[in-house]
Amino acid sequence: MNQDTASGHLERSIGNDRLRRALAARLDRAFKRAGISSARAARWLGVNEYEVQYWRRGITVPPLNACTRLAAVLNLDVHWLCTGHAQVA
């Protein structure tokens, strides 16, 4: 399953609504702590501001490459950002 298909499946799955909302909460909290706006993040990622706002609201899920780039910019562990769990060494 490629990344776009996986994201599309997650967006459509009612059972994963909780996971989307949890990811959105982590993203929103990280943006607020860093003082980063959706518009600024969208410029960094080369996406529309509305896409970032949808991610922060849990409407859609960012692609893995966006999570990876955001984690690097926000100095976060990408595994934590995507799952909410610390990566075990």
Image (cartoon, grey):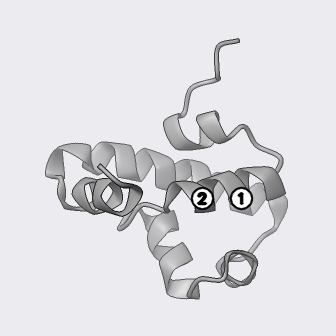
Query: Compared to 27, does 81 lie above or below?
Result: above
Residue at 72% from the left image edge and 37% from the top image edge = 77
Give x and y (percent) for residue 74. Answer: 80, 54
Inspect the image, locate mark 1, and give the three-letter code of the amino acid beneath it. Answer: Arg
**The quadrant where residue 15 appears:** top left
Give x and y (percent) for residue 17. Answer: 27, 50
Q: Which mark is residue 65?
A: 2
Classify mark 1: helix, strand or loop. helix
**The quadrant where residue 84 appears:** top right
Name the residue furthest top: 89
Residue 54 falls left or right of residue 19: right
Inspect the image, locate mark 2, and give the three-letter code of the amino acid beneath it. Answer: Asn
Marks 1 & 2, CB-CB < 8 Å contact: yes
Residue at 79% from the left image edge and 52% from the top image edge = 72
Residue to which mark 1 is pinned: 69
Give x and y (percent) for residue 51. Answer: 49, 79
